[in-house]
Amino acid sequence: MKKITTICVGILVIGSVTVMAQGMGDLTVDQLYEKARSEAFENGDYETARKYAYEALERSPDYHGIRIFIARMYSWESNYKKAEEELNYVLERDPENRRALMALADAQKWSGQRGAALETVNQGLKYHPEDTEFMLVKASVLYGMENYEGAEQVYEAILEDDSGNRKAREGLRDAQLQQMKYRATVSYRYDRFRTIFDPWHFTQFGITRQTSIGSVTGRVEYARRFSSDGV
């Protein structure tokens, strides 16, 4: 019975693959691309999506949009080596391809290759000067390299042309905070009770100092409870 079951499963798998292959043959390159996107985004099935995408590339190997999409899927699965291989194929044939450069910079950044990501994003800015998306990635990479001053300069350049850019404004604030040697904070909390207890008051003072090994924080809390004060 086990052997028969195994044979049946094998036949079903072969049959499904055959049906899929026959179905691919009836689709155009663009339809295959659309099927790949549908499998990836609607079903989360990257493996099947790649089958459709690679079938499209068999017919049109220099359809760069499809190859970049395949690379993105590899990156989403943390297979950065395969992603870079696909993107390098595109960039060897089209060095200025904006989408390929952006996808490569993302893959390098996500895999911790910040130096390589910075080179790629600078290449992107060479071909696409003042491209806001490239500039945001560059600032993010510099921030990750702890070059907060460099990140600040890039964020400021973005805001000069687009003062409402939320990502740049938030990034600028974070970069500036990282450069502050000391940072002070004050917080207050008030607890009120429905019983006979008087309200409780809490005030906290904190100071943080940036050091070469990270941040060091000291805090003092003042409390007034049961009509008495204390720290």
Image: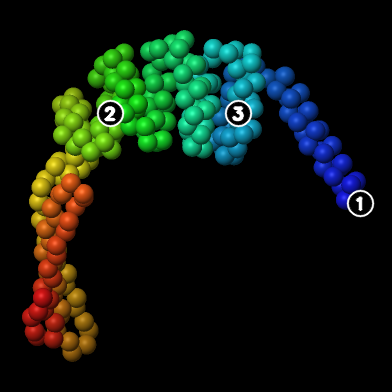
Q: As shown in the figure, which amino acid type bears the numbered disc 3?
A: Arg
Numbered label attached to residue 1: 1
CB contact under 8 Å: marks 3 and 1: no
Q: Secondary structure at mark 1?
A: loop
The quarter in which the C terminus is drawn is bottom left
- Mark 3 highlights which residue? 50
Q: Position of residue 215 (x, y in %)?
A: 19, 52
10 Å crowding of disc 2: few (<14), some (14-19), many (20+): many
Q: Residue furthest front?
A: 213
Query: Reading the chain from its start, which is encountered first: label 2 or label 1?
Result: 1
Disc 3 residue crowd, few under 14, some 14–19, many 20+, Cα 10 Å: many
Residue 133 visible in the snapshot: no
Name the amino acid type tagged 2: Lys
Q: Secondary structure at mark 3?
A: helix
Does residue 175 appear anywhere in the picture?
yes
What's the distance in space between the residues labelled 3 and 1, CA to CA?
35 Å
Who's the residue at 62% across and 34% down the image? 47
Reply above or below: 180 against 163.
Answer: below
The crowding category of the residue bearing disc 1, from other C-alpha atoms within 10 Å (few below 14, some 14 to 19, many at least 20), is few
Residue 77: numbered disc? none
Residue 182: x percent and y percent? 9, 51
Q: Is the C-beta separation of discs 2 and 1 under 8 Å?
A: no
- The mark that comes first in sequence, 3 or 1, is 1
- Residue bearing the label numbered 2: 138
Q: Say what secondary structure mark 2 lies in.
A: helix
* Mark in the foreground, 3 or 1: 1
Taking the spot 25% from the left edge, 33% from the top edge, the residue there is: 142
